[in-house]
Amino acid sequence: MAKRAQVTDWPLLRQLRGKDHLGRGAAVKSRVSKELQPRTVTADRIVKSVCPYCAVGCAQNVYVKDEQVVQIEGDPDAPHSRGRLCPKGSATLQLTTGDAREQHVLYRAPYAADWERLDLETAMEMVTERIIATREAGWEDEHEGKKTRRCTNIAALGGATLDNEENYLIKKLFTGLGITQIENQARVCHSSTVVGLGTSFGRGASSTLPGDLQHSDLIVLEGSNMAEAHPVAFQWVMEAKARGATIVHIDPHYSRTSALADLFVPLRAGTDIAFLGGIINHVLQTESDFREYVLAYTNAPTIIGEDFDEAGADGLFSGYDPEKMKYDPASWQYEGAFVAAASGQRDQLTELEGVGHEGAGQETEGARGEPTLDETLQHPRCVWQILKRHYASYTPEMVERVCGVPPEVFARVCELFVENSGRERTAAFVHGVGWTQHTTGSQYIRAASILQLLLGNMGRPGGGVMAMRGHASIQGSSDIPTLFDTLPGYIPMPHAHGHETLDRFIAADAPDKGFWGNMRAYTVSLLKAWWGDSANAENDYRFDYLPRLTGNESTYDTVMAQVRGEVKGYFLLGQNPAVGSANARMQRLGMSKLDWLVVRDFSLIESATWWKDGPEIESGELRTEDVATEVFFFPAAAHIEKNGTFTNTQRMVQWHHQAQEPKADQRSELWFMYHLGRRLRERLADSGQARDRPLLELTWEYPTEGPFDEPSAEAVLAEISGRGADGTQLSSYTELKDDGTTASGCWIYCGAYADGVNQTARRRPRGEQSWLGEDWAWAWPANRRILYNRASADPEGRPWSERKKLVWWDAEAGKWTGYDVPDFQADKPPSYRPPEGATGPDAIAGDDPFIMQADGRGWLFAPAGVGDGPLPTHYEAQDSPVRNRLHRHQRNPARQLYEHEDNRYHPAPDEPGADAYPFVLTTYRLTEHFTAGGMSRWTPYLAELQPELFCEVSPELAAERALEHAGWATLTTARGVIEARVMVTDRMTPLRVDGRIVHQIGMPYHWGPNGYARGDAMNELSAIALDPSSHIQEVKALTVDIRPGRRPRGAARTQHVRDHRDAAGVTARSGTDG
Amino acid sequence: MSASGEGILNVMMRGGDPATEAGWEDAPPRMGFFTDTSICIGCKACEVACKEWNEVPEDGLDWLGSSHDNTRHLGADTWRHVAFVEQRVAAPREDEQIGRGADEGFRWLMASDVCKHCTHAACLDVCPTGAIFRTEFGTVVVQDDICNGCGYCVPACPYGVLDKRESDGGIHKCTLCYDRLGAGQEPACAKACPTESIQFGPLEELRERAAGRVELLHEAGVTEARLYGEDPADGVGGDGAFFLLLDEPEVYGMPPDPVVTTRDLPAMWNRVAVAAGALLVGAALCFGGGDRS
């Protein structure tokens, strides 16, 4: 029969018998074509997952056949991504199943020339031993007479690419060990967003979701290259454009985002505060603000204390200490009241005389006073008048002189803002790291926040500040922080003060009103989650088990400590500082001083191999045989090989399910941390040392499953979400108690496992729910999708307009209702007025929409929390070719500098030698690559799309420096030298600034010497100079020299940098004025 | 079209549904791509999604210095190609891009190119093995198990799409994800496209949608918007994959007036037939004449 079938199947017979006599179609369909079946159909099952690249968090369908992943594509059901994926998301299959991933543990012995294989068990034992020995040597019980109980010589970096559950175990175990130097990508990406948004509105996360941009009438993308860095979220901008919205892109560099905008405004890198300040000035001078909103919902009417001195012409606020380059913010407080910030520098006020550990905060607890308001906005010391005076000098002419933006273009932007704000219309800001990575980064975000408050765009559909975050769970690793200065849920990490108790900590660091007034309940619940039965009222819930801070312990402080030889052990968990952090050379030099280094990643990234092939080996400054650092490389499991949650850029916590088992030694961080903790606890079980009690009493009982004893991620999520005394899962943070009867590992995630159901795994198709996607996964807090949405209604609770309604007061039902979960106590009527002396949520009136704020209002003026002033002020970047024309202080007077021979700063613009680094360099992402390249340079389908590092220069600069298109250029700073291919393009525009031409150079930062697509790392050029509130580095506005040709090799490379430095007269003093 | 003779190849010049003409009974509607380049963000998701699905090999690290294009052109290992065109243009209109000077504007065009799945497919006409065939969806697909790599189709394509892969000697190009279509799924590139610049669907629907889009853009003042490859009266009988462009096609590297390279074959065959007939008659006369003597 078969044979006969074959014969009749002959194409010629088919051709003669059928209708396709010419043999062009049906008759010639081959056997393979007939049997063709897509692997999406033949798969055994489809596993629901989430893209592991950026923080858009596109939902993925993972197709599994015979227990192996065979295809990964977008999940069309998802309300936020609608089944689409960018090139990186589309390359997930190759990323996870390609052959670039290491499968085995590798070990480099001290002074060894190469790697050797080590079995996983031995490696885990060795790391356990190293931790115990190193910790013992670096243990500190007290610092300058104050109890610290910390391990000073072990640090960890990385977490934004990992699951929330993994971050939770990292923070929990390391804190239990007394380690405080725990950091991740959030520090170097968006820490300043958290400060800026948090102090302004109460929460440090994006106020809205990309999907809401479709309702905007104006979208201003500034400091964001959204089309390239977040292509799938950009669909909502295109959706808005199709609906008639105007799209404006303001950026130093014309990118693929600019190409799709209606208006592109090039400005000089590092001048956005001057630009935004100019718009604020326009709004104030023309009184185009949304006055009802401003009066009711912002602190515009609030009167500031008499001691406050405005910045004025010199650019200094009151309280500045030039010796310490630091502010004492006491004089910025409200008249008659004391308010703590909801974010930012929370311990700031504790350090103040009278507020500190002696406890003025405590003394005045419950009696911190009421702010004095002037609803007429006439009082000379009310915020409105201060704001008006502060920005009066930010005129259109000044914007032109500083930013290089012509007045008519600037006027157009102002008009667009005003026309598209108010009752009927809303405008949204979208920002990314173009705003955050500056020495004034937190103030960039503050400036945008001020504008959005003045125009009444917060909490309303199509409004808000959309912070575009860059890693799959960088929002999650901020919420459940692998960060030194916070505990889960943005509870500040306690600082060392004399005789500090839980109550004193709460009194000093928490606002007494609003929902932060319940910080004691959040903190006690966290301590109960970590220390279980060991934590009780008698022992202050083991509050003293938390190690204490004495200063900054950011990743850059850690690097300096490594260079000084003070940090001996280092964990890199999916982060690649040898190319991805500022001053890459310092990063490597720091690592070369370590006793041991643990790298967990997919491939052999630069941070794992610097000891054998880094630039310092090539230059001869380091010799492999002299490097004592012991290096462990552990291959990591990918997202498809583990269960867990990522929190995306819109605070949405999405569960991804395991699709296959990892290979060989590949393991998840959950596995690594759990088993590391288990081993450490076993080793130290009989220890009589007090320092080991926090570790031994830590709750560390997680069920394990599968062939590798993987701890249950669901059990960890359940702990994070929280339980009551009877073990039932809690459904909201409002249920948390401060009496030890509730336990919750992260209060803002309370409810993620409500009713014992994994709420984060919910996936109701978008066609079956509203555009908010309220039944897709779960968003913190309380599944609210748009924050501060009480402000979408007027003080009486009625929508400002039909067109922009979101939530409103239903008087009949006696509750708030609407499309979103109200960001307000559901039954608190608009007429509610707090009784005298009320604290906590009860102190928030029925028309105070910012429920996390001490005064329930959006902060135009930040009386606390921001380290470099209550109002954003334009200072030039650390390295700038231009004098500050707005204020006498050239640079942020409170910025953080780090003195080291390898971290020199450039001379000020009018100092001798300044012309040695005459051009502005700005950096950005390309669609085709991911951050420091660890997930794209090794992925051939991505590498081939952007195979080499290049720099973008204007034809004018190319002519000036004889740079040839497609040739090579050498770029030099006082820190390093790199080479890049030259792209001469009209997309780079020379700007006329203050009467002269300023050239800007654009450069993506994804490359490094390892991987498939290789190139020099941009961060060889950057310096460690930080924003004081967030400790973020300035890498968006640098100055450089550029010359045609390739860079020197070997020892000549280092010499080139030194020669250039000497010629410019760079010294330790350069650029360090206050 | 001048050819109206009885040549056997003339069947392809009829204006009917190409799948029906290729012998498919009850063929589904003809499926195609409408690529609206006015909303393309140049992300290249289409290039990667295509390669992942079809297991098209990575084809080298070659930095071209050609704006953001490092793929160069369509080929055996590139079935979707995003072109990037940086343009200085006349003074910008109000509300448009700010240019480099008062009287000069700038724009950056991006467009994802693909096999056109022509109504009159020359590659299919010249394929001697039956490897290239017309599917029931009206698309044109190279069957790997049949193709012997003879390469006749390579110069035949008026768009330069067909290309030989050195590693296996076969000809490869976009299949419009024939396997996925068979299962009722959309092609990988269209599914991934973040902005719906690449739209997939029944060609008739796409043509209507495209006409509407052009109208909308014209109303919005984007008078340069035009369609390319949608016209059944053009030199290839209309493309199964057509485009909305913002400039002349040659700006994007597409031929301005493509003509099926086998257009003149019927006429040529007719002439060959006439010539052959004449020769035969001549020969017959000659030999016949010889007999007479």
Image (cartoon, rainbow, N blue to C red):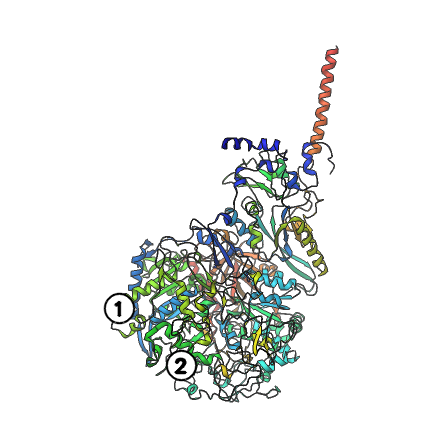
Residue A1073 position in % (x across, y down): 48, 76
Q: Using a 10 Å C-alpha cutoff, classify the residue at mark 2 as few (fewer than 14 neighbours), some (14 to 19) or many (20 or more).
A: many
Q: Find disc 2 in the rendering and name its residue.
A: A505
Give the residue pinned by disc 1. Answer: A685
Do we see residue A641 in this rendering? Answer: yes
Q: Quadrant of residue A956?
A: bottom right
A564 or A519, nearer to the observer: A519
Q: Position of residue A452 (x, y in %)?
A: 59, 75
Res. A157 visible in picture: no
Judged from the image, the secondary structure of the residue bearing numbered disc 2 is: helix
For residue A819, side relative to residue A552 (left or right): right
Asked if residue A810 is positioned above or below residue A53 in the image, the reply reads below
Crowding around mark 1 (Cα neighbors within 10 Å: few <14, some 14 to 19, many 20+) is some
Of all residues, the one furthest to the front in this rendering is: A812
* Chain ID of residue with mark 1: A
How far across and how far down the image is residue A906, in percent? 49, 70
* Residue type for callout 1: Ala
Q: Position of residue B74 (x, y in %)?
A: 58, 46
Q: Amino acid at mark 2?
A: Phe
Q: Nearer the viewer, mark 2 or mark 1?
A: 1
Looking at the image, residue A984 lies above or below residue B95 = above
Q: Is residue B226 left or right of residue B68?
A: right
Disc 2 with disc 1 on a shared chain:
yes
Return the mark for residue A284.
none
Q: Is residue A140 left or right of residue A513?
A: left
Please give left or right for residue B72 compared with residue A515 in the image: right
Instruction: Tell me which chain the residue with mark 2 is part of.
Output: A
